[in-house]
Image (tube, rainbow, N blue to C red):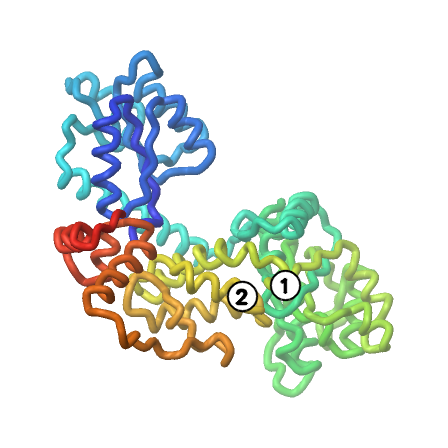
Amino acid sequence: MNSQWKILVVDDEIAMRESLAAWLREDAYTVDTAASGREALERAREAAYDIYFIDLKMPPEIGGIETMIELRKFQPDATVVIITAYATVDTAISAIKEGAQEYMVKPCNPEDLSAFVERVIQLKNLQRENLYLRKKLTRQYTFQDIISKNPRMHEIFELVREITSQRSTVLVQGESGTGKELIARAIHHAGDRSSRPFVGVSCASLAETLLESELFGHEKGSFTGAVARKQGKFELAGNGSIFLDEIGDISPKLQMDLLRVLQERKFFRIGGTTEIPMNARIIAATNRNLEEAVEEGAFRDDLFYRLNVINIRIPPLRERREDIPLLAENLISRLAIETNKEVREISREALKMLMDHDWPGNVRELENALERAIVTAHGEVLEVENFDFLATARHRQTPWEVPGDTSLAELEKRAVMAALDRTEGNIKAAANILGVDRSTLYAKLKKYGLSR
């Protein structure tokens, strides 16, 4: 739905300001207003808007051009439309030259206004898709792509900033699905190794002999099937980074081999006689408690100390539930692109269901749940029923039954009230939910004495 798009209307004339805002709200956009350039800049510093409609002349305040120039200093990519009742070629040229995307003359034609906003949003959607596809192709993510407002996560972000350009080994610990590889990639791509290889290895997915060959490589003829020389991951990583995922699952022999690499910073290919330098930064990750594994004798204490130079512990999602709305919004935007679905947002009731879930699979489970819901959704909004697969018996709702003493008119009134409540008074969105046009809905409001 359009409510995810935020628009700010700036005009010193209240009639113009409110009429323009009202029309845009009819199109289901989230619209705020400001009576001056100064007020507009204050609002923009508090929250970024997708589109700004700014009046050219607002005496005795700063004018539209000056407001736009100041706005560009902290929101360089903002879409700005200059509106004016004093249309001249010179002012139009000046507005466009200073960076305005469009120049409109009062009184604005509502249909032209709606068409323009729709074009801008289509362009912004394409830009977002292109940005996502570029990141997907390059897999270059930084800590800025890790979404969180949790204090513990922000401590991790600060630590990532501090260690990005160091060589020290990093151990990332956390439950399955918390984003350990994303943190590892952030460490790599935010530092001076970003232009060099990032090589990942899943230590849990390969048998000991295969993992040994994968890490160190082998010479031709060193074992049956070794028909040619093969470079290992340590060698391929060069001066970049090597990510050893699920390091807690490697065998005692490979623990010894890895300890030697960490101590001597060099290794041999299997069957080889030439020492190869190891210049890559090692970032290891595990969902196991390695301290307990050391105490139980399942993991070498000397290897643990070598790996645990810098320790990052990622909290599970159930300990940072305040991140669920942020993650859901971001994941819905991305997954809608991947699945080619028109889903744009999630209802408050469905979001509450996600907030109440314990998420044993953490962010990965949340992503999978949202993808499943998006694939099966038939509208632009994810509702509670799209997440029925998450519900336990005590969460499942009983079928709704019509009260026996309720009239048809009362049911219609309740339906109108529910639609308005869900859309927070947005007439166009409520009409879409009810399957009627705006004029019909206005008639129902008048009939039942309801207000928006």
Q: Is residue 122 visible?
A: no
Residue holding disc 2: 356
Rendered view: 251 above or below 427:
below
Task: Calculate the distance from the C-alpha at mark 1 to the C-alpha at mark 2.
Answer: 14 Å
Residue holding disc 1: 316
**Dividing the image into 4 quarters, which one contains the N terminus?**
bottom left
Q: Nearer the viewer, residue 406 or 358?
A: 406
Amino acid tagged 1: Pro
Percent position of residue 364, x then y:
53, 67
Amino acid tagged 2: Asp
Q: Earlier in the sequence, mark 1 or mark 2?
A: 1
Seen at 41% across and 38% down, the residue is 48
Please give left or right for residue 211 compared with residue 303 in the image: left
Please give left or right for residue 156 compared with residue 5 in the image: right
Seen at 42% across and 63% down, the residue is 349
Percent position of residue 245, x then y:
65, 68
Q: Residues within 10 Å of mark 1 (few under 14, many from 20)?
A: many
Question: Which one is in front in this view, the residue at disc 1 or the one at disc 2?
Answer: 2
Percent position of residue 400, x then y:
34, 76
Q: Which quadrant holds residue 15?
A: top left
Rendered view: 243 above or below 372:
above
Q: Circle 1 sits in a helix, a strand or a loop, which is it? A: loop
Per the rendering, the mark at residue 90 is: none
Q: Circle 2 sits in a helix, a strand or a loop, which is it? A: helix
- The total number of labels drawn is 2
